[in-house]
Each structure stands twice: as C-alpha cells, then as structure tokens.
Image (spheres, grey):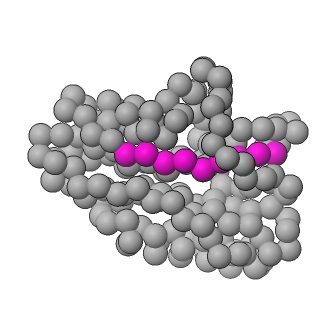
Amino acid sequence: MLIPSQYFVTSGKALSAVSDLNAFDLALFEAGIEELNLVAVSSVIPPEAEMVEYRRIPMGAVTHCVLAQMRGCGGDVISAGIAYTKRKDGYGGYVAEGHSFGDGESLKEGLRAKIREMERIRGVELEDPEIVVEEMRVPEGSYGCCLASLVFCGYR
C-alpha cells in the first residue's frame, strides 16, 4: 500500500501558438512538474501527511497528484484550481479540484462549495480551505492552459 506522507501544492499557466497540448506542457513546466508521469488520484489527504515546500522529483517518476486543468483558445477566459483542507479532528483532509470557462473568483466560490459538501457528506468539521487558482484570458490566435495540483511526494 502506498500511503502519502508528504505533499506540496503548485500551479501554472501558459500560452502556445501551436496547440492546447503544448500550452498544457508549458503550464506543467511553469508548475515545475513537467518531467513527471502524473497519475491523477482523488481527494483524500491521509492522516499525518504533511505539507512541504516544492521539491524537484526525479525525471520520469510515477507521481500521484490531484490535478485540475483547463484548456482554451483565442478569446476564452479559463481557470483551474484546487481547494485543500484538513479535518478539525486532525484525522487527514480533503482536496477539491475544479476548472471552468470563466473567471477565477467564480471558480473559488465553487471550490468552497465543494469543500462544504464534502464536509456535509462525511459529517465532519473541516478547517477553512486553502485555495489556489490560475486564470487567464487567452489571446486570439493562441491556445492556453491553467492548472493547479496537489502533488504527493513522499510515502510511508
């Protein structure tokens, strides 16, 4: 069993004249996770897992993360983000991700609502969430990508 013991949060946004895939690749580069084999996981931060500063992970490493991304093209307003929080009883935490054709403030409110719903479903009290959102208006003739990720970087 792989149980994450450490994580960091990162984000990026980028433009490309070639494709939305290249914009995504550049956004990964800005976030510092471009050389990893990312595996998307759901929303649970294990008990005792601690947040650490960004760290470089070896090239090609299979890396678990909660990833939000949004791609768009000329004229689009795009945003992507995550909200993360711990339980007040100290027993782990949760991550919510979101993306939209729209501004970052609207996305932040949607992320807060997702965290509140996770709290309601589980019948637990959660701390106020930390929220990381990237937003951009993609210029005409370009492709854009916004992303945010909680990256697991240590295991017990």
Residue 82 point in image, percent of width and height: 53, 58
Q: Can residue 64 be seen in this view?
A: no
Q: Is residue 63 above or below residue 119?
A: above
Q: Which residue is drawn at 55% across and 47% down?
A: 10
Between residue 133 and residue 100, name the one nearer to us: 133
Between residue 41 and residue 107, name the one nearer to us: 107
Q: Is residue 33 magenta?
A: no
Look at the magenta stretch and give its main secondary structure: strand
100 on left or right of 2 = left
Residue 108 point in image, percent of width and height: 46, 70
Which quadrant: the N terminus? top right
Tell me where residue 16 sits by quadrant: top left
Q: Can residue 105 be seen in this view?
A: yes
Label tally: 0
Residue 116 point in image, percent of width and height: 61, 77
Tell me where residue 5 sits by quadrant: top right
Q: Which residue is drawn at 58% across and 27% down?
A: 37
Q: Is residue 12 magenta?
A: yes
Q: In this view, does 97 lie above or below 145?
A: below
Residue 22 point in image, percent of width and height: 32, 30
Magenta segment boundaries in residue numbering: 5-13
Between residue 40 and residue 77, name the one nearer to us: 77
Which quadrant: the C terminus? top right
Q: Residue at x 32, y 36 (%)?
A: 23
